[in-house]
Image (tube, rainbow, N blue to C red):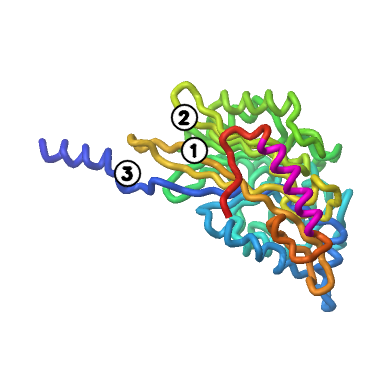
Amino acid sequence: MLAQVFIASIAAILPYHVAPKEATLIFAGDAMMHEGQISAARKADGTYDYSEYFQCVDSIVGAADFAVVNLETPLGGKPYSGYPCFCAPDSYADALKEAGFDMFLLANNHMLDRGDRGLRRTVDVLESKGVKHIGAYRDEEQRDSILPVIQDVNGFKIGFLNYTYGTNGITARHGAVVDYIDKNRIKADIRRSREAGAELMCVAMHWGVEYKLLPNAEQKRLADFLIGEGVDMVIGGHPHVIQPMELRSDSLGRRQLVVYSLGNYISNMKTTSTRGGAMLQVGLKRDPEGKAMVDNACYHLVFTQPAEPGVSNYRLVHPDSCSHARWKQAGKAFADEARRIFGEHNIDVPEAQR
């Protein structure tokens, strides 16, 4: 009997000793596909090549245990199009996957740009490529079969959810599902995720006002609501510009991360603020009792360098590393503004050391 008690005791504490003590996540902002990008990627044989896009930053993504990006365009098939109704070639998803992204966020205001058919085709393409996705589904039945999404990241059980404020006035007409911001649904989804074993919760929100460098009152209220529901990481997008990041601490010393906007990941937008964004790096750890927690966060600035003579395609670079003289000043202007906003408003989320 004593032997059985001893074995049971060892089995109870063993997971805390053998489970990895750390993990790293990467989050990227809005992966856009404007007409200029489509044209530059088009090859003579009619294919579309995005292989150069992420070569300068894929080491950052690849170093993470799990990486997430917002796919802000449906993969609706030909004809392809940019703003205002996006539709990207399937090879764009290949490039993001090859860059190291493990999960695509689909709850955004452009996911219904090609209607239900485009949304369903997007889901089909991603599933055929083995890419995880959340936020949009063929129908409610598929949503119920996929959620809750509990991802094992180096031994950390993380629940992922994704919601958008709207879809530009386009509504699903034939049963396709986009997850809209609805507090009751969010609360129910969080509860289901926790019941399914999520140690940590990450909720990605498509929210806010475009081109505003600071969050509005509604974003702040929603962030506080999510933190109040026990969410550990709130990751925002949609404004197409960066907004501040906060690593908060509660009364028990646990940390909760709020990122209001990561800005654009890659795009063909042309104002200073919209030419780039931030990649967020999050460190997870276990406390002495083995409980999972957010430990730290930092950001990497990224800048879209458009195609130029000698550079056949768009390319994501660090803003301090633009290879063409034309873009050096633009990269500096973007970085200066982003660092000013982050320097004035970030709470315990510094820039990553290069």
Looking at the rendering, the stretch of residues picked out in magenta corresponds to: 328-343
Point out which mark residue 294 bears: 1
* Number of residue marks: 3
Question: Disc 1 on helix, strand or loop?
Answer: strand
Q: How many residues crowd around disc 2 within 10 Å: few (fewer than 14), some, or many (20 or more)?
A: some
Labels 1 and 2: the sequence-earlier one = 2
**Where residue 241 sits: x, y (%)?**
76, 42
**Where residue 188 sits: x, y (%)?**
59, 28
> Which residue is at 44% across, 24% downward?
252
Q: Nearer the viewer, residue 164 or 49?
A: 49
Q: On the image, which quarter does residue 129 sit in?
A: bottom right
Q: Is residue 21 left or right of residue 12?
A: right
Q: On the image, which quarter does residue 245 sit in?
A: top right
**Where residue 229 sits: x, y (%)?**
56, 25
Residue type at tag 2: Arg
User: Of helix, strand and loop, which mostly describes the magenta segment?
Assistant: helix
Residue linked to disc 3: 15
Labels 1 and 3: the sequence-earlier one = 3
Q: How far is disc 1 from disc 3 in space, using C-alphas? A: 19 Å
> Which residue is at 47% across, 33% downward?
195
Marks 1 and 2: CB-CB under 8 Å? yes
Labels 2 and 3: the sequence-earlier one = 3
